[in-house]
Image (tube, helix red, strand yellow):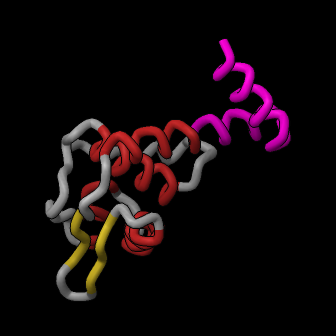
Amino acid sequence: MLLRVDPNSSAALYDQLAASIRGAIARGELGAGERLPPARDLADSLSVNMHTVLRAYAALRDEGILQVRRGRGAVVADVDSSRVEVAEAVRQLLAVGRRNGMSLNQIHQVVDEGAQS
C-alpha cells in the first residue's frame, strides 16, 4: 500500500491522506482487520505532522471506515469496499463542482441528468 500527499495541493493534507486510505480500501489493497501504521511512523514516512495523520484517522473513524483505539492503533473496519469507492467519487465530484462555483443544487441537477442518460 502506497499512501501519498502533495504538499503543493490546495486540498488539506489530512483530506489527501484520508482519500488515499479510502482509495486503498476501494482498490482492495487494504481489507477489514488490517492495521494501519502508527500515526508517528506514517507521519515520518510522509514528512507531515503526526496530528495531520491523527486527524485523517479520526475523519475515517467518524465515517465508520476505521476503528481507532488508543494504544492499539487504527484498524480497517468491515466495510463494503464498493461503497467506499462510490463515497470517494462523490467527494471528488463535490470538490470539482465547488471549485467551479456550482451550488449543491446544480451538482444534483448534473447527477440527475447523468442518471437519466
Q: Nearer the viewer, residue 62 or 112?
A: 112
Asked which quadrant contains residue 95, the reply is top right
Q: Position of residue 91 (x, y in %)?
A: 57, 44
From the image, which quarter does the C terminus lie in?
A: top right
Asked which quadrant contains residue 53, the reply is bottom left
Q: Is residue 92 above or below residue 41?
A: above
Q: Position of residue 115 (x, y in %)?
A: 64, 22
Q: Is residue 24 above or below residue 38?
A: above
Residue drawn at 40 percent across, 61 percent down: 48
**102 within the magenta span:** yes
**87 within the magenta span:** no
In the displayed structure, does residue 98 sit left or right of residue 17?
A: right
Instruction: Determine the residue located farthest toward the top in the rendered image.
Output: 117
Majority SS type along the magenta span: helix
Instruction: Determine the residue located farthest toward the bottom in the rendered image.
Output: 70
In the displayed structure, does residue 39 sit left or right of residue 90?
A: left
Residue drawn at 63 percent across, 45 percent down: 10
Marker count (numbered):
0
Q: Nearer the viewer, residue 101 or 28?
A: 28
In the displayed structure, does residue 40 sit left or right of residue 95?
A: left
Instruction: Determine the residue located farthest toward the front in the rendered image.
Output: 116
Residue drawn at 22 percent across, 71 percent down: 38
From the image, which quarter does the N terminus lie in?
A: top left
Q: Which residues are magenta?
A: 92-117
In the displayed structure, does residue 87 sit left or right of residue 48?
A: right
Q: Is residue 61 above or below residue 31?
A: below
Q: Position of residue 65 (x, y in %)?
A: 36, 61
